[in-house]
Image (tube, grey):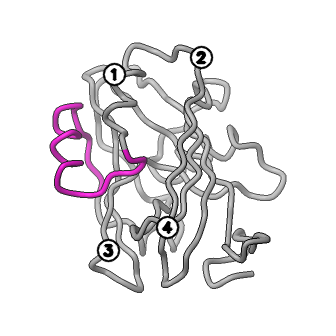
Amino acid sequence: MTKLGADWQVGPDGIPTRRAARVVLLSTDGKTLLFEGHDGDDPAHRWWFTCGGGIEPGESPRAAAARELAEETGLVVESARLVGPVLERDADFAFRNVLARQIEDYYLVFLDGPARAIDTGGQTGSERNLVDRWRWFSAEQLVELAERETVYPLGLARYLRRWERGWDGVKLRVTERNSSHPPPN
């Protein structure tokens, strides 16, 4: 176990690492859901991110994405409805005064309607401590947000343009090393 929790394992390079699954929600009115969070050890470190989190032992990334979506938004989606994985992100970041690495699989969920209220009542204690608010963003709003604030994954607006009409079957791979920014949850 590390300072970050039991699901983080120290790798051969000494960096705590974990696998995670994330969901990009896309509504029929062209919006995507993001959460804003902060690092409890450094509240000035703030960022926006998609829903998702660590993969539990014995859980597939797809099942973890569906579970995290239900916990964090109240939206229950069969794991077979998740599209992808569309992106794999391998990122280093500072969090809780530790350099950490998270390897994430991203899935798409296309909602059957417009952006709507979500239910955050299923969030875990650590998620409630991390997440400050949530908001739906249009592609234009997301571009503007990313110009002034940190949004994960970096380049999300560009990816959304690629995915807005569906997935082309290509799993993108990005690596973000030695970032001084905190991670998504």
CA–CA distance between discs 4 and 2? 29 Å
Q: Point out residue 118 in the picture as x, y percentages from the top left corner.
A: 36, 45
Q: Earlier in the sequence, mark 4 or mark 1?
A: 4
CA–CA distance between discs 4 and 1? 35 Å
Q: Residue at x 59, y 16 (%)?
A: 169
Q: Earlier in the sequence, mark 2 or mark 3?
A: 3
Considering only vertical position in the picture, is 172 above or below 181? above
Q: Earlier in the sequence, mark 4 or mark 3?
A: 3
> Residue at label 3?
45
Considering only vertical position in the picture, is 77 above or below 120? above
Left or right: residue 168 compared with residue 45: right
CA–CA distance between discs 4 and 3? 11 Å
Tag 1 secondary structure = loop
Disc number lying in front (4 or 2): 4
Considering only vertical position in the picture, is 185 above or below 155? below
Rendered image quadrant of residue 11: bottom right
Disc number lying in front (4 or 1): 4
> Residue at label 4?
93
CA–CA distance between discs 1 and 3? 33 Å
Which label number is shown at residue 129? none
> Residue at label 2?
169
Q: Amino acid at mark 2?
A: Gly
Q: Amino acid at mark 3?
A: His
Magenta residue span:
134-154
Q: Point out residue 24 in the picture as x, y percentages from the top left corner.
A: 45, 37
